[in-house]
Amino acid sequence: MWAQKTIKLRSRPRGFHLVTDEVLQQLPELSHLKIGLLHLFIKHTSASLALNENADPTVREDLEMFLNEHVPEDAPYFQHIYEGPDDMPAHIKSILIGTSLSLPISEGRLQLGTWQGIYLGEHRARGGPRLIIATVQGEYF
């Protein structure tokens, strides 16, 4: 079985956001799979997807602070400045973090570790709603 759909995530401010529940609510078909794979791809060049700590929100805050320190706005060498001071740093952060995840499915559930969750990295001050293409492949019960 193969299925593909577009998931729309609501707008969020800049930072890392735990979106596991929001993604899974839009993928009820996962519950019918004995074994499979979920591939998520974000259709944006200024946002990213990652898998990391789902319990302590300070991890997400620390990641944001680290990236902002290493990829600052208004760096004098940036040439791509037409869309604002946060745009070029957002592109760099998107490349560093990545735009896709492949996650295993067993017995109708994602097989994430106890402390793992899906992150949306919103790298613009006002990125707007974000679109993710979810591709599911697997075997039904």
Image (cartoon, rainbow, N blue to C red):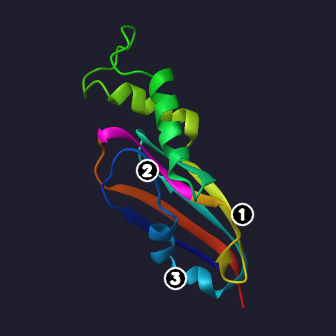
- Label 2 to label 1, Cα distance in Å? 26 Å
Quarter of the rendering occupied by the C terminus: bottom right
Depicted 84 relative to depicted 106: above or below: above
Q: Amino acid at mark 3?
A: Pro
Report the residue at 33% width, 16% height from top.
74
Q: Main secondary structure of the magenta part?
A: strand
Percent from the top left, x then y, of residue 112? 69, 65
Say above or below: 61 vs 136. above
Q: Which quadrant would residue 113 be assigned to in this image?
A: bottom right
Which residue corresponds to the image point at 47% horizontal and 23% vertical from the top-left? Answer: 69
Above or below, 74 against 41 in this view is above
**Nearer-N-terminus badge (1/3):** 3
Tell me the element at label 3: helix
Residue type (three-letter) at the residue carrying disc 1: Gly
Q: Is residue 56 magenta?
A: no
Name the residue that disc number 3 marks: 28
Instruction: Indicate the amino acid at tag 2.
Output: Lys
Q: Which residues are magenta?
A: 118-125
Earlier-in-chain disc, 2 versus 1? 2
Pointer 2 residue: 43
Q: Is residue 138 above or below residue 87?
A: below
Closer to us: mark 2 or mark 1?
1
Q: Nearer the viewer, residue 28 or 75?
A: 75
Pick the front one: 133 or 62 = 62
50 relative to 110 in the view: left or right: left
Quadrant of the image containing the N terminus: bottom right
Judged by depth in the image, the label closer to the viewer, 3 or 2, is 3
What is the number of the mark on residue 113?
A: 1
Question: Is residue 92 visible to us here?
Answer: no
CB contact under 8 Å: marks 3 and 2: no
Residue at the image point whose x is 34% and y is 38% from the top: 124
